[in-house]
Amino acid sequence: MWEQIRSNQIRSAILVIGMGVLLFLIGYFLGLYFFDSGIGGLVIAIILWAIMTLLAYFQGDSILLASAGAKKISHDDHPRLYNIVEEMRIASGLPKTPDIYIIDDPSLNAFATGRDPNKAAVAITSGLLQQLNRDELQGVMAHEISHIKNRDVLLMAMTSVLLGTIVMLSWYGSRIMIFGGGGSRRDSSSGGAAQGIIMLIALLLMILAPIFAQLIYFAISRKREYLADASAAMYTRYPEGLASALEKLGASSGQLKSANQATAPMYIVNPFRKKGRAATDFSSTHPPISERVRILRAMGGGASYIDYEKAYKEVHRGRGSVIPASAMSLTGSSSQTVLRPSASDDPGRLERTRETSDVMWKLSNYKTIDCPCGTKLRIPPHFSEKRIQCPHCGINHTI
Amino acid sequence: MEIVLWVLLGIVVLLLLFYVFTYNGLVRLRNQVKNAWAQIDVQLKRRYDLIPNLMETVKGYMKHERETMEAVTNARNLAQKISDGGAAARSKAEGELSSALGRLLAVAENYPDLKANQNFLALQEELASTENKISFSRQFYNDSVLNYNNKIQMFPSNIVAGMSGFKAGEFFEVTAANEREAPKVSFS
């Protein structure tokens, strides 16, 4: 595992450095244009970037979870979900079980957060929780745990901060250039041609850099999604679980209220997806769901990285590669899929819906009384009466 | 003359660095193997703890399944007794416990009252999940051993491993006959 992480880190580091170079170029030429000092601009760009990084580093998790309205659960709130996360923690060899959150939202999604594996969390919407059977839930959680294990969360946080700084610098830079007219050399008569060239470069950078940075960002994000799918298949030894879960996710198009562009790469599927878009798209954080399902289904009874790579090539007619070469030796000792009972007929659907709604009521501090007539009475947290009458059969219950 | 000396010194430093990094990498992998083995233990112990609760819950409902229930209890006690023993005897006992438990849960399907019992349902989930955790920790252990053995046997790290006395790890083999024949399935 460790080698795979290291080689990912090297490859991702090159892309991140590329973005860093873009940032420095922008800072340098803006500085040259505005105060006649490229180094000054560089320093400003670096300070801005450092402040944004610190903000993201110390508040990232809490902001993401708080903005999503997530509620933390313990083992007794939802034993099945808790057990599944623990199973995947064991399969991946993470040192500690991540905190588990449920987001009360009917749309279907899940995400992972936490910059280091010891302080990580996974979250799932209540909508998804009631849609998925045990195998599918296991696939989804394996995908999220892979994000933690592969350190994707830290990487994506760092790149999104870089992207944000580049976009911010270009935006303000171009506004000031166009409307403020603040060039320091405006009054001096010397070096007209050189000044013109610098202005042209600065303008070009301000237009192109955000676009390039965005493309790099999306490219990194998509690669990490494929890798997390491959890891999920390896951990569960059952690619069909994730494939069938993704299919359910693809059939829905509800957008998650609490997501935003910066947090999008953390989710299992793009929270802003629109129905029916299938083509590979350079401006997306996630690969098309249909393609991810096709790759997982093409693994043909294997569950290792090699099988995933082969399936990826098959689907892409031999082009491209997702798994770093050094990770290919990690075959997995018994890398066959395990035969499980068919998940297509789904008898537990109604029970899961009830179970999920019970958990959500309980997490909102509602008490539940089971009346002998079969009615469930939900008592709100601020209910002050000592007794309550069942509206169905009229029995009095003490609270 | 001086240049040759510097080159030689450089080579020695590089070799030393290679040795240190490879040695540390091997230690890391060996510790991972040890830790993975301990994880299997944790889950097996958890299963010992769950079984008495299960028996207590099932007792009232399955009066006619005395043999099946006794088989589980006996297999559990035997497995716990030899849990300090050798790996081979141990995995045999655990395999027998697994199949005895499987029989009990299969028979439980015939008792609708039992299947409606909340306590039993919760235990069933815990047991199923513990079985999963046992097999996932075994899977992770075997993957760790594979990584470790690869590193020990492949060039050039095998030189360091040979010099420092790293020995190849043992895989955790499955002994229960029905578990060994994992059928190969294809979704294409």
Image (tube, rainbow, N blue to C red):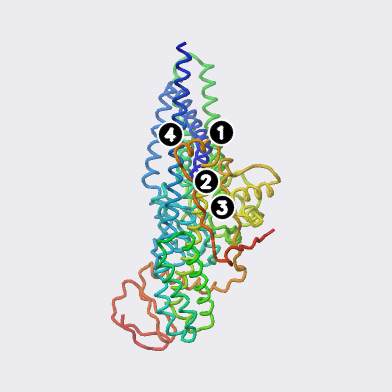
Q: Mark 4 lies on which chain?
A: B
Q: Which of A272 and A159 is in front in this view?
A: A159
Q: What residue type is labelled 3?
A: Ser
Q: Is residue B8 visible?
A: yes
Q: Which amino acid does label 2 sit on?
A: Asn
Q: Which amino acid does label 4 sit on?
A: Val
Question: SS class of the residue under badge 2?
Answer: helix
Crowd around label 4: few <14 · some 14–19 · many ≥20 (10 Å)? few
Q: Which mark is residue B20?
A: 4
Q: Which mark is residue A333?
A: 3
Q: Which chain carries label 2?
A: B
Residue A270, horizontal then vertical, whole percent:
55, 52
Residue A190, horizontal then vertical, whole percent:
48, 13
Q: Mark 2 points at which residue?
A: B149
Crowd around label 1: few <14 · some 14–19 · many ≥20 (10 Å)? some
Question: SS class of the residue under badge 4?
Answer: helix
Who's the residue at 66% across and 61% down the image?
A: B185
Q: Nearer the viewer, residue B176 or A318?
A: B176
Q: Earlier in the sequence, mark 4 or mark 2?
A: 4
Q: Which mark is residue B169?
A: none
Crowd around label 2: few <14 · some 14–19 · many ≥20 (10 Å)? many
Q: Name the residue under label 1.
A: A208
